[in-house]
Structures are given as C-alpha cells and as structure tokens.
Amino acid sequence: MNLLLVSNSTQFGGGYLEHCRDALVELFGPGRRSLLFVPFALADHDAYAARARTAFAAMGHDCRGLHDFADPIAALASADGVFVGGGNTFRLLDQLWRRGLIDPLRARVRAGMPYAGASAGTNVACPTIKTTNDMPIVAPPSFVALGLLPFQINPHYLDPERGSTHMGETREQRIREFHEENHVAVLGLREGGMIRVAGARTTLHGPRSARLFQRGEFARELATGCELSFLG
C-alpha cells in the first residue's frame, strides 16, 4: 500500500496542508494527477472541496470532491489517488458506510492507489474509530473503519500539561481506558506527525516523537524516522 497519514491538516503559523506539502507531493508522484477529495467529515462539502482543490492545484494536481460524482464508486475506480479530509470522524465514517464506499475504497487502496488522510481521514484508516477525539454527533452503522493499518492512531495527541488544575481525563488516561476493553496498540500522533506506508515499510515522520501505548505495558516514545512495522 501507499499511504500518508497526517495528524493535522493545518499547522500553527501555516496554511492548509502547507506543513505536509512535500510529503503529499512525494506520495502522489510527479506529473499531473486526478485526485479525489472526500469531504464528508464537514457539513459544507462544496466549500471544503474548494479548499482542497486550491491546495492541490498549487501542487500541480487536479482535485474533485467525491460528492460531485453521480457514481462515486466508478470515480474511485478511475482515480489516481484519494485524500480524506479532517473534521468529525463519526460523520465521516457514517457517510462512508451509508454511501457504500468502505469496501470499494479499501480495495483500491490495498491494490496500490495512493491514500492520504488528515485527522479524521487518518482515524478512518485504522481498524476502528475508537481512538478519535471527536464527539459522536451521528451514529455510524459500525465503528469498524478501513483497517489499512494494524494499529490505532490518536491524532492531535496532547501531553499532560504540568501544573494544570484541569480535573478531566488526560489523553493518556483516555487511551488507558481504551486498553481496558481492547488489545490493539495505539500511537499518539502529535501535531505535525505523519505516518508513511510504502509497501511493507511503515515509518514515523515529522518534527516530534510519537507516544506508543500497548495494553499492559508502559507508554514509550518513538523517535521520528523510526520503523513501525513491528506493530503488525
């Protein structure tokens, strides 16, 4: 497979997809590409697709919203690549299921079509969406997602703030709760972090380390550039 999974689509101080532009260019390759943008994580599909179209035009690619096609499955079958945008993960997965897109999208990506996702688009590449940070504003038919990775990701991972008087759960505590009921590993992907899957190789990229949680073990830091294939 050929994947780029990004924690966040906008980095502080930069524009939309600016911080991961080089990685996206590398993923989709040289020359003009016909890309599909999946806008279902936000309510205004047209405005979201226009934003993505502008960003990818600057990279030399054509990009159309999947919602614009009368036959989205046929559009997936002929696309050169797909980018799944961030927003609410429950809404995104709900639409993928209800539009019959889970199996066709999974099949094309497993056959080698480049897939990029940011935030919610990264969440749905996991086995389930159980480690998203989002509120369940809709109820998808299933929490089962694309399963392109053998482990879970928690995008926008935040470390506990020293001296904070906030009494709610930290992100680490919430992931520990996940492991009270589930066995699959969880990678806390901090802002700017990216996971690159190229064939059999899965690696961590970005300016910061990531935090790995495995059931029954102490959490540990994984340095940028490290190989993640040991997770499955």
Image: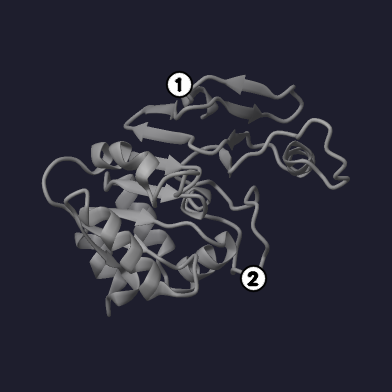
Q: Is residue 85 left or right of residue 114?
A: right
In the foreground, 182 or 86: 86
The image shows residue 26 at horizontal and vertical percentages of 25, 36
Is residue 101 shown left or right of residue 187? Answer: left
Secondary structure of the residue carrying tag 1 is loop
Q: State whether residue 164 is above or below residue 83.
A: above
Q: Earlier in the sequence, mark 2 or mark 1?
A: 2
Q: Which residue is mark 1?
A: 227
Q: Residue at x 12, y 51 (%)?
A: 32
Residue 190 x/y as whole percent: 57, 36
Three-letter residue code for mark 2: Ala
Confirm whether residue 165 shows in the render: yes
Locate the N terminus and report the quarter of the image it occupies: top left
Q: CA distance from mark 2 to mark 1?
A: 35 Å
The residue identified by callout 2 is 139
Task: Give coordinates of residue 80: x percent, y percent.
Answer: 20, 53
Within 10 Å of disc 1 (Cα), the crowding (few <14, some 14-19, many 20+) is: some
**Residue most extreme to the bottom:** 70
Image: 143 above or below 30: below
- Residues at marks 2 and 1 touching, judged by CB atoms closer than 8 Å: no
Q: Secondary structure at mark 2?
A: loop
